Image (cartoon, rainbow, N blue to C red):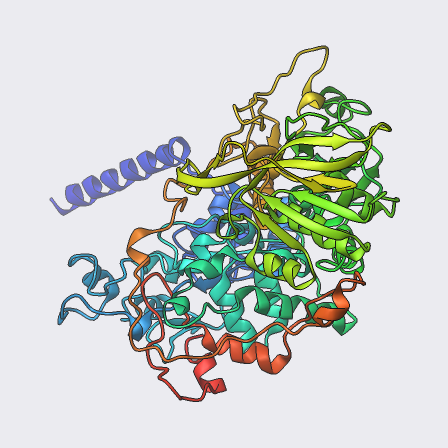
Amino acid sequence: MITASVLILLGIGFTSAVILAVASKLLYVYEDPRIAQVESVLAGANCGGCGYPGCSGAAQGVVEGRAGATVCVVGGDAVAEKVAAIMGLEFSSMEKQIAFVDCTGGVRAEEVYRYAGVKDCRAQHMLYSGSKMCPEGCLGFGTCITACQFGAIEMGPNGYPVVDPNLCTACGGCEQVCPRGVITVWGMTARITHLNLETDCLAPCRQRCPGQINIPRYIEQVSRGDYAGALETIRERIPMPLSIGRVCPHPCEGVCRRGRVDEPVGINMIKRFAADWEMNSGTRLPISCAPDTGRKVAVVGGGPAGLSCAFFLRRLGHSPTIFESMPKLGGQLRYGIPEYRLPKAVLDWEIEGILNLGIDVRFGQFFGKDFTLNTLREEGFEAVFLGIGAWMNLNLRIDNEDAAGVSTGTEFLTKVGLGVDTGTGGKVVVVGGGNTAIDAARTSVRLGADVTLMYRRTRDEMPANIEEIVGAEEEGVKYLFLAAPTRIVKDDDGRVTHIEYIKMELGEPDQSGRRRPIPIDGSETLIEADTVYTAIGQKPELSCLYEDGVCQLEETRWRTLAADPDTLQTAMPHVFTGGDMHTGPALVITALGEGRKAARSIHQYLNGESPHVDERTQRDMIPYTMFTDVPNVGYRERSEMPHLIECDERSCTFGEIEGALSEEQAKHETCRCLRCGLTCYNRDLVDGQECTSGDCVKNQ
């Protein structure tokens, strides 16, 4: 019996061994030894920041080709280089990533109900999206802090998390657990290609800025004395803070909440202060660029839009070449804005810094004549940006407009910019009410002329910057309002002697919102003039787009180049546009902003994507952030820009008029900022309270 049992057990064991032996051959799972090798060089943190379940999963992802050598966000370049060596991959340095907190609310944010539940942001968010009034602000329970395995985040004194960039590994744990999207992990590429989202912490000034500059952030940095950081923030959106600091009409200040209390914060003054600080320091701040991709892009036009597009394409690693018809770059910045507003030496310094990134330029190249879209394609350019501006002038459509001594304001200013004789006489009449008209008038004064500016509406309807209108008046320009030209009077030699105008009165508002000018019958009057400059509007010259009588692109009814308003991609997928060619005559800051948007879309196109934007992209002002009652804020006097040349000296020199704020003035102006978020702002600065450095930095 015992013997039989033993034999049975031995038989079962032998049979099992045979079955296992066969199964091992049939079901054998081979594990690539490289998985263990890769895992051995990873950081071993098992943080999950790579998106895989621990380092073992990440190593398997690398070997299977689902992840690259840079999979380990904790290990950085050192680990990535080892992984690349094991896998036989090419290695290029990883772009520095860091967690960024986009919130300035914290304890300032009002509560809509009292929450007494689990002290976890995710738990509170499940109850009516949280108790804070601002739907995108930090809830303040620090769930992100507990998720960080590296001690890189702590709750700041103002009720929202603060990141230590030296400890942050960009593992993404904090970003994943935040229910409100307050924290974003990103590097340079993501920062400069980001478009404002309605879920971002957008102060009204950020919403209104055509360049989408993070205004509260750079003001905060200037308040702390971090001028280099402020410029880095500005250059994530525009490449020309020196120029914009001098010529921007600062629409952002029109929605500044401080303006509901006293006067808006001098946002543009602060920007110019930071930009001038760098230029006057004697050194240039480094501007980081991604590794070269070798992708060639043609940028047609070296004005603000083209310069901006080329700048951001280069920062994204691509190789832009600018094609420019004029002798120098700058477009309307150089040939349309007078020296007293933007000195050419300043513009040259700024453009030099852009070109130093590695941007090629070909001067004297006329689009449609020296090259076409087809020849650019043949030369190896994979994408094209068209930014030739709006240089074609609108006509008055009156008799004798072709008389000698009559020309356009842009032609006149371009001659001045080129140093060419303008032939300006002693009696000048400028027709128009925009910035070009004002620039032509003030420039004529500096050439010794007696100048009258004729405008068909009143001073209140003039579209020019109010500072420019006042400046022209101070310099002796005479205004003739409610007057529209009807004909040019010329002598036997064909030269203008007078301009006839008819008096106007204002009727009902038109589509622009301004009251429509109506002629008064029988009121025709003559005014003496030996020179007339017209400045009533411009449009792009699109004839250069035609090849053999055919244009493959589309025009709008406003005679601008048609493109997707979000991506700026035209009817030809590899061709993009921006600036005045797309919008019609607009602000320099708008052109710079469109240059970045186009570079973003070109970057997507070159990477094989269809250019696109997030569905939550902010396009209009966010209504619930535009409240007009700003209580508990004390009066603080606005700083004034210093004048380098006094009023009685200005009319005889082209020297720059306005200077930059002093450091003390700049600090004072930053302290006037309310540190706004979507709905939050500082409420504790009362009348008479001195603005100290502590007040300035408390909401960083």
Out of 695 and 35, give the one closest to the viewer.
Answer: 695
Please say whether residue 170 is visible from this viewpoint: no
- As displayed, is residue 457 above or below residue 296? below
Out of 307 and 612, give the one closest to the viewer.
Answer: 307
222 to the left or right of 195: right
Give percent across and percent down for residue 299. 70, 36
Out of 482 and 341, give the one closest to the viewer.
Answer: 482
Outermost residue to the front? 522
86 to the left or right of 672: right
- As displayed, is residue 435 above or below residue 568? below
237 to the left or right of 509: right
Q: In the image, what residue occupies the spot 53% across and 29% down?
A: 563
**Image quarter in which the C terminus is found:** bottom left
Give percent across and percent down for residue 131. 19, 65
Query: Residue 538 sits in which quadrant?
Result: top right
Give percent across and percent down for residue 617. 40, 44
Count of numbered labels shown in the rendering: 0
